[in-house]
Amino acid sequence: MSFNTLSDLRKARGNFDSLMKEVEKLDTPQQGKRGDDREWKPTVDQAGNGYAVIRFLPAPQGEDMPWAQLWNHGFQGPTGKWYIENSLTTLKQTDPVSELNSELWNSGVESNKDVARKQKRRLSYYANILVVEDSGNPSNNGQVFLYKFGKKIFDKIKDAMQPEFQDEDPMNPFDFWDGANFKLKIRQVEGYRNYDKSEFSAATAISDDDAAIEAIWGKQHSLAEIIAPTNFKSYDELKKKLDFVLGNGARVSTAESISSVTGDSSDDSFLKDVTAAVESRAAATPTASDTEDTMSYFAKLAMDD
């Protein structure tokens, strides 16, 4: 159900149950956008630590869900080329990399399974947020942005909606009236960003002024646009790119014929793998396009979970 007026949104606050069902769907196993000025990224100090307060916002006007999820792949082939593409599985369509990974996994060969693990899909979430406090960039305070985040933060959202203990009441973090601010606490732990200490404050209305709430709602960005089919290449285009990255235009089914450097940033080993890949390539003389593709990808990853 989408909402076009604030009064409709207020009346539909009882749709928490349907939102819970969507969260439950995400827990069921199933068979990746860009950086721009709409996206907010937290500021961290030289030690890699940071703090900010944000408020997750409800579905934008005319849309159903307060978050969007995007699957993508990012890995290097034996050619030295990178495969960095949104996965058609986001749209519940067949994707050539997922097909290849299934073949590798079903081969029963452990080394093939290792390759499939390393080039598995990577999941990102997008939501609209109101920046309540950004001490690193105070000009962001009071502004509405898109926020891209990973599983660890989404787990915090799910925990608020589905509390583990009896003395905790379910809370819809995306609700204007009954939601809560989220204290984002970033620490650098063993070289990686850690969000374990992040937490929601007590539930409170985002504002007592309906006009102010409606103004915030009107500034939200489309989430449906992020996963619109126009942001995905066709199966044939992706297959052609995959064959090019793997070399010789052929499907491969052995670990030896695929680069050992692939990854999923939801696994801490991913950044170690890709760092090793970049260092190994430094000894070679990359083309301008190689460098641009690689650096563009890691620039995006640097700020992600």
Image (tube, grey):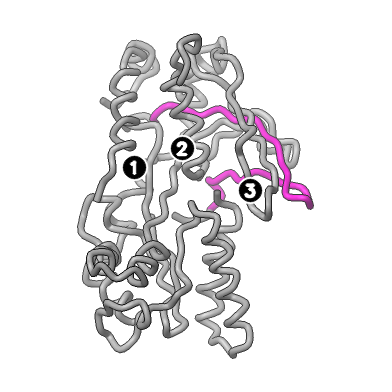
Q: CA distance from mark 2 to mark 3?
A: 20 Å
Q: Nearer the viewer, residue 78 or 253?
A: 253
Residue flagged by tag 2: what amino acid is it?
Ala
Is 154 inside the magenta-drawn segment?
Answer: no
Dot in front, 2 or 1: 2
Residue flagged by tag 1: what amino acid is it?
Ala
Residue identifier under label 1: 224
Say which label, 2 or 3, has the lower sequence index.
2
Q: Badge 3 local density, few (<14 within 10 Å), some, or many (20+)?
A: many
Q: Which mark is residue 193?
A: 3
**Element at label 2:** strand
Place residue 258 in its image quadrant.
Answer: bottom left
- Residue drawn 48% across the image and 29% down it: 157
**Element at label 3:** strand
Dot in front, 1 or 3: 3
- Residue drawn 54% across the image and 46% down it: 39
The magenta region covers 36-59
- Residue drawn 70% across the image and 36% down it: 51
Q: Which mark is residue 127?
A: 2
Place residue 53 in its image quadrant.
Answer: top right
